[in-house]
Image: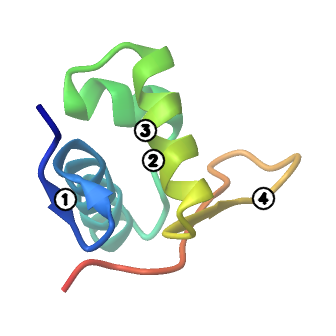
Amino acid sequence: MSKKKTEGITEPQAKTLRMICEILDANGLPPTVEEAADALGLSHASAHEQIAQLVRKEYLRKEERKARSIVVIKRLD
């Protein structure tokens, strides 16, 4: 059984991307991985993997050596 795709990403990845955009828009800063995990109800490792997949698919970028390093490249419409 395959997961539902949303513009080249899975629904859990889309949920992660939406949450990151919402926090960024509300606070002016992206969430930390720990904040993302808490907001999504996931373990730190699972949230990290969701973010890593979105980086690989070029929806996000992470800046090295920087706290709150998530940068949104593409948003879902």
**Residue denoted by label 2:** 31
Residue 32 screen position, x and y as percent: 52, 39
Closer mark to the observer between disc 3 and disc 1: 1
Query: Residue at left 26%, top 74%?
Result: 7
Three-letter code, disc 1: Lys
Looking at the image, is mark 3 or mark 1 earlier in the sequence? 1
Give the Cα distance between marks 2 and 4. 13 Å
Q: CA distance from mark 3 to mark 4?
A: 16 Å
The furthest residue to the bottom: 77
Q: Please identify, in this view, whether the residue under mark 3 or under mark 2 is nearer the observer.
A: 3
Rendered location of residue 52, percent (x, y): 57, 43
Task: Give the alpha-carbon distance from disc 3 to disc 1, as whole Å.
Answer: 14 Å
> Is label 2 in a helix, a strand or a loop?
loop
Q: Which residue is mark 3?
A: 50
For residue 24, side relative to residue 48 (left or right): left
Residue 34: where, in percent of width, then height?
Answer: 46, 26
Callout 4 amino acid: Glu
| SS state under label 1 | strand
Name the mark on residue 73.
none
N-terminal-most mark, 3 or 2: 2
Residue 42 location in percent, x, y?
28, 19
Dot 4: few (<14), some (14–19), or many (≥20) neighbours within 10 Å? Answer: few
* Of the pair 39 and 26, the residue shown nearer to us: 39
Element on which disc 4 rests? loop
